[in-house]
Amino acid sequence: MIFDYNVIYEALPLYFSGLLTTLKLLALSLFFGLLVALPLGLMRVSKQPIVNLSAWLYTYVIRGTPMLVQLFLIYYGLAQFDAVRQSFLWPWLSSATFCACLAFAINTSAYTAEIIAGSLKATPNGEIEAAKAMGMSRYKMYARILLPSALRRALPQYSNEVIMMLQTTSLASIVTLIDITGAARTVNAQYYLPFEAYITAGVFYLCLTFILVRLFKLAEGRWLRYLAPRKH
């Protein structure tokens, strides 16, 4: 078997362009997904049945359906309705980048909401009692004590979600975006070198994963140090 990496070397600008697209999709999806997940996570621990049930239904439906189906419904499905094509939303919904970011943000918001809810439920009773003893209102207790503490404890689980979202962004190439996987598809289509094209894409994803894991390890070392066993 002969490997032709000269083609890959010439295609590196395309891969780096795809890298920027992947990072943009990941950053936007995580940012807006987290914005939606925070209130959803609080709703999931609410004692109001209607509030809790509505958040549970959202996370259940999103987590229970494939990401690819959600992406196709947003990018291809909505376009079949005249009302959508004639609405003010069409300039955005006709954009592959917007639809991909929207689908990824919706998907990660459901998983992140459950992570936050789980961390809130695992809050030690001592923290709650201490906040009440200081006379904090419910809003201040969540804003200053419970939510920051839960977010710190959620870092290990959230890091896994971020890595999974990085891999999920590879689906963007299906809706015409040239991300890392899209670059590999383009190289393979032009030169029919699937091994070289996709191995190169795999190396890019592997490097990104390594960087993200290291960043989260540093974050955990800083904000979860108080949970580490004390040395005697």
Image (cartoon, rainbow, N blue to C red):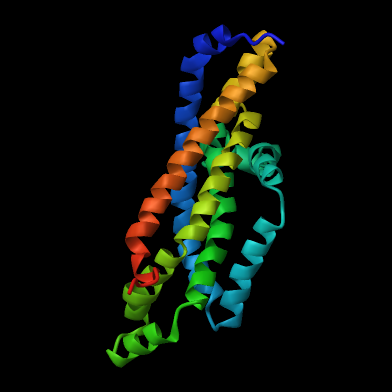
Q: Is residue 136 above or below residue 36?
A: below
Rendering coords of residue 134 (x, y %): 27, 89
Identify the residue at the far bottom of this view.
133
Image side of residue 219 versus residue 5, left or right: left
Where does the C terminus fall, quadrant-wise?
bottom left
Position of 154 with respect to 184 (left or right) is left
Depth check, front residue: 188 or 140: 188
The image quadrant that residue 183 belongs to is top right
Q: Residue placed at 67% from the left, 19% from the top?
A: 195
Q: Residue at x 58, y 33 (%)?
A: 94
Examine the rendering and report whether any part of residue 177 can be seen: no
Looking at the picture, does residue 124 appear above or below residue 11? Answer: below
| Residue placed most toward the observer, 172 or 231 | 231
Residue 120 at least partly seen: yes
Q: Position of residue 21 (x, y in %)?
A: 48, 30
Return the residue found at the far front. 232
Q: Residue furthest left?
A: 134
Residue 2 vertical position relative to residue 126 in the rendered view, above or below: above
Instruction: Say which quarter of the image contains residue 125.
Output: bottom left
Quadrant of the frame with the N terminus? top right
Residue occupying the point 43% across, 70% down: 150
Residue 210, position as x, y percentages in the image: 47, 40
Find residue 169 and report its horizontal and vertical position in percent. Answer: 57, 38
